[in-house]
């Protein structure tokens, strides 16, 4: 039961639409706090996933979060200010870019956790 519980916890952590939340905070408050929270929380989830050998859960989560964010971003398409706020990118292009950039700190944390596990 514990193994399944950790998988579910990791996937649930990732199922939050981090990129959408970050873009929404940036759009409404001109604040980069959402992006910082995304990096911190997803890095912690990657660390937990590696520590408990739940790489599949991390991969599923990294696929689920952008899909859920994409859904919410599509819901904002009717807002003209939203469509032009992220120039030179469209909101969906920024979703893809931020999702890929967010993988970098996760990979770093993943590698550091590997070193800590083997010492």
Image (spheres, helix red, strand yellow):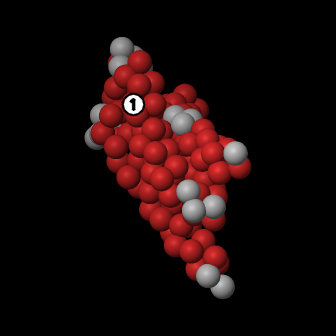
User: Residue 51 at x, y = what percent?
Assistant: 63, 65
Residue drawn at x 60%, y 47% is 7
In the image, what residue occupies the spot 57% across and 62% down? 53
**Residue located at (65% from left, 51% from top):** 3
Q: Position of residue 37 (x, y in %)?
A: 62, 47
Residue 26, x across and y down, in percent: 52, 36
How many marks the image carries: the answer is: 1
Q: Is residue 25 above or below residue 72?
A: below
- Label 1 SS: helix
Front residue (pair 5, 86): 5
Q: Is residue 58 visible in the rendered structure shown here?
A: yes
Q: Quadrant of the N terminus?
A: top right
Q: Is residue 31 visible?
A: no
**Mark 1 Cα within 10 Å, few/some/many (few <14, many 20+)?**
some
Identify residue for label 1: 70
| Left or right, residue 15 beside residue 94 | right
The single residue placed furthest to the front in the displayed view is: 1
Pinpoint residue 20: horizontal percent, then vertical percent: 48, 33
Left or right, 57 with reference to 5: left
| Quadrant housing residue 43 | bottom right
Question: Which quarter of the figure has residue 44?
Answer: bottom right
Residue in front for this viewpoint, 14 or 7: 7
In the displayed image of the protein, which residue is found farthest to the bottom? 119
Residue that extends furthest to the right in the rendered view of this protein: 2
Residue at screen point 57% across, 51% down? 42
Above/below status of 83 relative to 42? above
**In the picture, which quadrant includes the C terminus?**
bottom right
């Amino acid at each position: 039961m514990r193994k399944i519980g950790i998988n579910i916890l990791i996937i649930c952590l990732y199922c939050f639409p981090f990129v959408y939340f970050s873009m929404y905070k940036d759009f409404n408050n001109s604040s980069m706090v959402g992006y910082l929270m995304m990096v911190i929380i997803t890095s912690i989830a990657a660390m937990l996933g590696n520590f408990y050998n739940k790489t599949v859960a991390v991969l599923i989560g990294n696929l689920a979060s952008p899909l859920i964010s994409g859904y919410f971003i599509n819901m904002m398409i009717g807002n003209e200010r939203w469509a032009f706020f992220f120039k030179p990118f469209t909101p969906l292009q920024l979703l893809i870019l931020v999702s890929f950039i967010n993988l970098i700190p996760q990979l770093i944390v993943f590698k550091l956790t590997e070193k800590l596990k083997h010492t």
